[in-house]
Amino acid sequence: AQRLVLTREHDDLGMVSTAGPAAKLSRTPVEPGCPAPRPGRDAASILGEIGMAGELERLIRQRIVVTEGIEPGGAS
């Protein structure tokens, strides 16, 4: 009822539960944003911005960048 926990659709994971905004402000209500992207989802574009686009596969192999095997709601 207080929206402290929100269950909503995640682009990659389906329905997920996340913490909602704790502050309840009457004149400037807080609205939750979208759930965080899956880890590594934007790694290629970030590496591209810093001139390392060709390094993604190596970084994944060396487990420097992790894109798979992360379960929603759990520690990796």
Image (cartoon, grey):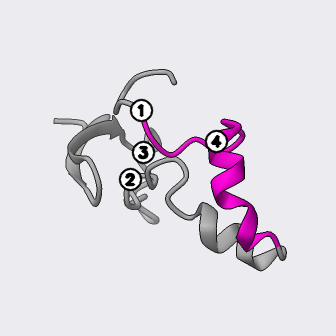
Mark 4 vs 2, N-terminal side:
2
Q: Amino acid at mark 2?
A: Pro
Q: Which mark is residue 69?
A: 1
Which secondary structure lies at badge 4?
helix
Write down the quadrant of residue 72 in the picture. top left
What is the three-letter code of the residue carrying label 1? Gly
Residue 56 in picture, x, y percent from top left: 67, 59
Instruction: Magenta stretch: give its range.
Output: 52-70
Which-is-in-front pick, marks 3 and 4? 4
Mark 1–mark 4 distance (CA, rounded to whole Å): 13 Å
Residue where numbered disc 4 is placed: 61
Which numbered disc, 3 or 1, marks the residue that appears first in the sequence?
3
Mark 2 and mark 3 in contact (Cβ < 8 Å)?
Answer: no
The mark found on residue 21 in the picture is 3
Mark found first going from the N terminus, 1 or 4: 4
* Rendered position, 2 above or below 76: below
Is 39 a magenta residue? no
Q: Nearer the viewer, mark 3 or mark 1?
A: 1
Which residue was labeled with disc 2? Answer: 35
* Nearest to N terminus: mark 2 or mark 1: 2
Q: Which mark is residue 52?
A: none
What is the distance, in whole Å, between disc 2 and disc 1 at their CAs? 18 Å
The residue located at (26%, 47%) in the rendering is 13
For mark 3, does the 10 Å Cα neighbourhood hold few (<14), some (14 to 19), or many (20 or more) residues? some
Q: Secondary structure at mark 3?
A: loop
| Kind of residue at disc 3 | Pro
